[in-house]
Image (cartoon, rainbow, N blue to C red):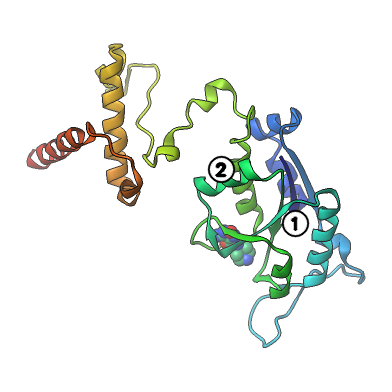
Amino acid sequence: MRFTFITLFPEFIKQATEFSIIKRAIDSGRIEVAWVNPRDFTEDKHNTVDDTPFGGGAGMVLKVEPFYLAIQQAKKSMPNAKVIALCPGGTTFSQHKANELAHEYEEAIFLCGHYEGFDERIFCWVDEIISIGDYVLTGGELPALVVLDAVARLIPGVLGKLESTVEESFSDNLLEYAQYTRPVEFKGMIVPPVLREGNHSLIGKWRRKDALKKTLDSRPDLLRRVNLKKEDMALFHEIFDEAKGEKNV
Ligand code: 4GS
């Protein structure tokens, strides 16, 4: 899959994609990352990309023309690209959206803002607005990189066999169960014996129960979307009984 970032800070994207799995995905040709700088599409001597807002108020607004021209430039080599703007006002990003982008598109253009935001007219050339969460950042580069990262790892061959086994987490709407590796004891804390005893049916039960417990603790909102199995009721009973036990100590 090919990704082009419209950004005033291409170095940010370049450096962030030079590590680990994303770097390997680029080197193997499974993904392609490019950038276009709207500043290269300005004509004035200071290469101005922002200006004060009509109507007054604090902050600066990104000028429509340099961003429009940068999108057109990116589209020359990616005519079918989906144009995605990263803004707090967009639809919240999710694993579901990552799957959709990875499986239904071959090309994506990420529009990264800065300062107060874009001139509204740029959205005529935007197909979709994505937010990575309800907080305000200084620029759209990190959100675009978050989307790239989540999408790239779903592309076949990007994760190795070992890495891909860790997939589960959001796909079944449960949080991941706890994992351990050597040593068995660290500062008095031991790895649960059941995980060391090799009974795979008991290990499976322990992991399912831990995933249910973690989801109940941290993300109870997810439970409505879990496909509960009939064995889960017994596990919930155990979880509640253990919680009661802990309170009485
Ligand atoms: C987000 C976000 C964001 C908003 C960019 C203020 C600079 C900034 N973008 N998800 N202007 N959250 N963007 O905070 O996507």
Q: Quadrant of the N terminus?
A: top right
Q: In which quarter of the image is the C terminus?
A: top left
Would residue 47 be found to the left or right of residue 132 on screen? right
Q: Which residue is drawn at 39% across and 16% down?
A: 182
Mark-to-mark CA distance, 2 and 1: 24 Å
**x, y (%) of residue 78?**
80, 49
Mark 1 close to ligand 1, CB under 8 Å: no
Task: Look at the numbered disc 1 and give the secondary structure of its residue.
Answer: loop
Q: How crowded is mark 1: few (under 14 residues within 10 Å), some or many (20 or more)?
A: many
Q: Which residue is drawn at 53% across and 53% down?
A: 93
Q: Is residue 140 visible?
A: yes
Q: Which residue is drawn at 72% across and 74% down?
A: 121
Front one among 175 and 224: 224
Which label sits on residue 7? 1
Q: Which residue is drawn at 63% across and 34% down?
A: 155
Q: In which quarter of the image is ligand 1?
A: bottom right
Q: Residue at the far top: name it.
A: 198
Would residue 135 be found to the left or right of residue 18 on screen? left
Instruction: Give above or below for 211 relative to 78.
Output: above
The kind of residue on which mark 1 rests is Thr
**x, y (%) of residue 73?**
85, 56
Residue annotated with mark 2? 99
Q: Residue at the far bottom: name it.
A: 55
Front one among 131 and 125: 125
